[in-house]
Image: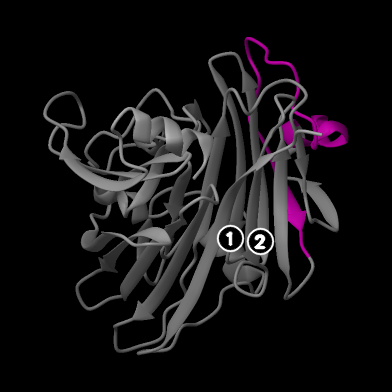
Amino acid sequence: MTSTARGRAALGWPEAAVEASIRTDGPDAGTRRLRVIAGDLDIELLPDRGLDLGQVRHRGVPLAWVSPTGWPRPSGGPFGATFGGGLVTTCGLLSFGPPSLDDEGEHPQHGRYTTLAATVTRAEVLDDAVVVEATIVEATVLGAHLELHRRIRVPRGEARIELRDEIVNRGARAVEPMVLYHVNLGRPLIQEGTVLHSPAERVVPRDADAEAGLATWAQFPAPADRYPEQVFAHELPVGKRVSAEVHAPSELGIRISFDTAALPGLFQWRVAQRDGVVLGVEPATAATILGRQDARERGLLRALSAGQSWKLGLDIGVMSLEL
């Protein structure tokens, strides 16, 4: 038992639990929450946003960046007015990047996933882990019909979250899914001097704003009153299990691990604005952040045949950097 777990026990708190609640007021009134406690981790799950991860705390210290919008009830409004951040926002299932239009229809910025409600099918405390499972459907009439099965497993005593997704094509024809895991890290982990260690073979800026910060992409800068967002593409080795690590001066670190056979893209989103200090680490199914049309033109879309499935996922672990 960890020291934090002993502290919980002394106070009569559970070492592991799942607690369900519904918000009763504010812009997110009526939305569901699941709170997962597993040793040192205290995790907020958002069933009404595809069972994405909201704020996550390690020994009481917040890890995620949460935007000022929070998580209002999804309404289809502008992305910037509803993007709550959190430890993981899933983008997809048919598109990520800027808005686009193709034979599958109109795709809003970063897709529709974050507006989809999950059907929670399991929430259980086991001897070795806490497990939550859910089903999420993205479908249109006579169009694409994708069903995602999500499993979140938190091993007890390891300070690690395992997120596993299986996307099944329930439609009658092949479709081309696009998925990006938008991992959003914030204060106090992200501060001046925090370092990103990437498995990339090359780092490429998205635009002129990113080009201005290319020489220092790995080290988080001092926050300023105004700081344009910077996005970098990290070109990865093919078909390997890799990890991106974020090391804070506070001797705390985060390791994000995934398989490049399933997630060949990786993007870095950085904003060093005093009211918006955030570092995004974003594994993806396609190595472009410029949207569905760009992915198609570059031959980066992969077909998922009717009745077939893909397995995706990542692990997010907390590391102690004490010497």
The foreground one among 196 and 290 is 196
Q: Is residue 290 visible?
A: no
Quarter of the image with the C terminus is top right
Q: Pointer 1: residues within 10 angstroms few (<14), some, or many (20+)? A: many
Instruction: Judge left or right: residue 237 versus residue 181.
Output: right
Q: Pointer 2: residues within 10 angstroms few (<14), some, or many (20+)? A: many
Mark 1 and mark 2 in contact? Answer it, CB < 8 Å.
yes
Answer above or below: position of 63 versus 158: above
Q: Which residue is mark 1?
A: 284
Q: How is the image coloured?
A: one colour
Instruction: Judge left or right: residue 97 versus residue 209.
Output: left
The foreground one among 86 and 250 is 250
Query: In the rendering, at what x and y percent does residue 136 appear?
Result: 28, 64
Q: Is residue 91 visible?
A: yes
Q: Residue at x 29, y 38 (%)?
A: 77
User: Does 103 appear in magenta?
Assistant: no
Instruction: Judge left or right: residue 72 versus residue 188.
Output: left
Answer above or below: position of 55 versus 157: above
Query: In the rendering, at what x and y percent does residue 153 appear?
Result: 42, 60
The magenta region covers 209-236
**Mark found first going from the N terminus, 1 or 2:** 2
Three-letter amino acid code of the residue under disc 1: Ala
User: Does 211 appear in magenta?
Assistant: yes
Query: In the rendering, at what x and y percent does residue 224 appear?
Result: 67, 12
**Dividing the picture into quarters, in which one does residue 214 lie?**
top right
Q: Residue at x 41, y 59 (%)?
A: 129
Three-letter amino acid code of the residue under disc 2: Gly
**In the structure shown, which secondary structural element does the residue marked by tag 1 occupy?**
strand
Q: Residue at x 16, y 33 (%)?
A: 23
Instruction: Judge left or right: residue 153 versus residue 299.
Output: left
Q: Which residue is mark 2?
A: 265
